[in-house]
Amino acid sequence: MITLTSRKLKLLWGMAGIPLLAGIYLSLRQDNATISATTPWQCVGGCGAGGSGGTGADVKWIGTGVSGGLIDAEVMGSSTIGENFRYQQVKTRLSWKPTWTTNLGLTVPIVSKIGTLQPKTNLDDKSEMAGGLADIIIDFSKNVGMEGQYSVMFNLTVPTGQYDIKRGREQEMLYLPTTLQRGGGVYNASLGLSRTKDLEKGLWVFEAYYNHPFAINFHGKNQLVNSKSDQYNDVNARWDLLSSEQKKRFEYGFKPYGENDLGGYTPPSITAAVYFGYRGIEHYVHSFGAKVWVPFGVAWIPDFSASSYNPSPDPDNKTWSITLHYGLEFSRSEYPIYLAINKVIISGSNKNNMKNAFDERALAKWRTPDLKDLLNMWTFAIGIKTTMF
């Protein structure tokens, strides 16, 4: 059994300095001021992404932004806090326009997490921390329509973050819960469509994504099980005990669904959002919005023992989440600054079937908001943009 309590973190700002300093000294200042004045909403959204999952830590930039150089840079730091946890990250995104209507970007997130691991209720809990590189995101978008008001977007999340972090002593190693891992261990392809509607003093942004996780194994076999690693006792004996059907879960090159090598499963999902940006006050952009995330299935988690393979449905499975957004851009021609607050509302957890731990039906039922976290779960973010070369 896992409980998450008292997460204390230090935000990792290490990657923020390089893009920021490079942008200040290398940006094309005069050209940027002209572009911002003639196309004030050209950079709305910034990241070109936003449908990669249900976490409220993904803050969308709504504002005039800045562009005009060969490479646009955005650094966004955020901290998600709740009654008994914190999750912090710094995202650095570099983007390039191959053509006037297309945009190609790379987002590198650095995360820091802490939580409490309690595999059994009769054992004392202990705090664990994990931090470092998370899953990077590659995104591509193309504007279409008579006025470029529509945008077709494709995001690919690459599993660069470690998803099998474990702690403990020798033969008692335990995997950290999925909420403390730096990555998910699977790819995630997101296909989306956005619509921008300009007004006299603002604009509306509508967007929707379909997110589909999948797995690729370049080795062809699960290295964590079918190997000579001392992580397992009697590895070959364990492998020989598996049936042919069970071995198929480990010997694969491609899985069209989001199950990683440990048995953790991420279901497909949809994300829909609407934002309004108000530009009636000179040099400022106020934005308001809401994002809804709904998965098509129940998430599974791996066994916490590093010496066994026994995944099961996540007892803390969420059936939906809603993120309410407020942002304020300090619109400057060279390097605008963005402040944002997100209020995250999640569904309550269902009780799993005590007689059958593998029964998903009870966990899939929709619930009202989690009252315990209704007023406690928030995301605070600060970002800066620039353009260079």
Image (tube, grey):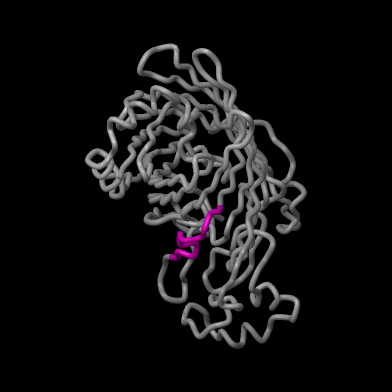
Q: Is residue 80 visible?
A: yes
Q: Position of residue 174 (x, y in %)?
A: 48, 66
In front here: 271 or 37? 37
Q: Is residue 271 above or below residue 113?
A: above
Q: Is residue 206 visible?
A: no
Which residues, given as a range, are shown in magenta?
156-166
Q: Position of residue 139 (x, y in %)?
A: 52, 48
Q: Residue at x 35, y 26 (%)?
A: 34
Q: Is residue 377 above or below residue 307?
A: above
Please state, as top left, top right, bottom left or bottom right, where the C terminus lies in the image.
top left
Q: Quadrant of residue 320?
A: top right
Please state, as top left, top right, bottom left or bottom right, where the N terminus lies in the image.
bottom right
Q: Residue at x 58, y 81 (%)?
A: 226
**Lateral position of residue 193 relative to residue 183, left or right:** right
**Lateral position of residue 139 relative to residue 353, left or right:** left
In front here: 331 or 273? 331
Q: Residue at x 44, y 12 (%)?
A: 280
